Image (spheres, rainbow, N blue to C red):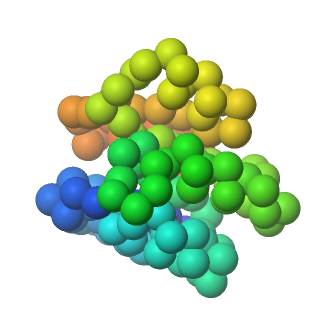
Amino acid sequence: MTKILVVDDDPTLVELIRVTLKIKGYKVLTANEARLGLNIMLKEQPDMAIIDYMMDDRDGLSLLKDIRSIVDFKNTPIIMLTASGAPDIVSKAIQYGVTDFMIKPFKVLMLLKRVEQYLKK
C-alpha cells in the first residue's frame, strides 16, 4: 500500500487531507511538527510527503532540506503547502528539491490530482 506522510500543525487540514487520501486507498501517516515528521520519514519510508511551510517547531524548508539530505529520499515526491507564495520561499524550496507547491487555501481535490500525478496512480 502506498504511504503518504502529511506534516502540518493544523489538525483540521491534516484530517481533511488524511480522510481524502485514505478514501483513495493510501495509507496516511501524520505529524504535527517537523521533527516528528522527519522521524516518521526515517522509520516508515513513505512514498510521498506533503509538508507545510509554517510550523511551530521548524519551518518546512528546514524539513525539506533534511529530507533531501538523505539518499533514500532524493527522489521522493514532496509537495509543500504554504499560505505565502513569496519568491524567496519558492526559490529556496526549489533549491532544496521540492516537487510542487500548493498555496493555501486550496481545493483538496486538486491536491489529490497532484498526488496521483506524482505517484502515477
What residue lies at 46% left-to-right and 49% top-to-bottom? 59
116 relative to 25 in the view: left or right: right
Q: How many marks?
A: 0
Q: Quadrant of residue 8?
A: bottom left
- Does residue 113 show up? no
Q: Residue furthest top?
A: 87
- Which one is nearer the viewer's eye here, 2 or 41? 41
- Which one is nearer the viewer's eye here, 95 or 117? 95
Q: Quadrant of residue 95?
A: top right
11 relative to 23 in the view: left or right: left
44 relative to 24 in the view: left or right: right
What residue lies at 54% left-to-right and 21% top-to-bottom? 88
Where does the image place residue 103, in percent across and percent down from the top left? 34, 29
- Which one is nearer the viewer's eye here, 30 or 28? 30
What residue lies at 62% left-to-right and 83% top-to-bottom? 43
What residue lies at 36% left-to-right and 53% top-to-bottom? 55
45 relative to 81 in the view: left or right: right
Where does the image place residue 82, in percent across and percent down from the top left? 36, 36
Q: Residue furthest left?
A: 12
Q: Residue furthest front?
A: 57
Q: Residue furthest right?
A: 71
Q: Quadrant of residue 69?
A: bottom right
Where does the image place residue 46, in percent across and percent down from the top left? 59, 69
Which quadrant of the figure contains the N terminus? bottom right
Where does the image place residue 111, in percent across and percent down from the top left? 36, 41
- Does residue 15 show up? yes
Up the image or down, 8 lies above or below 88; here it is below
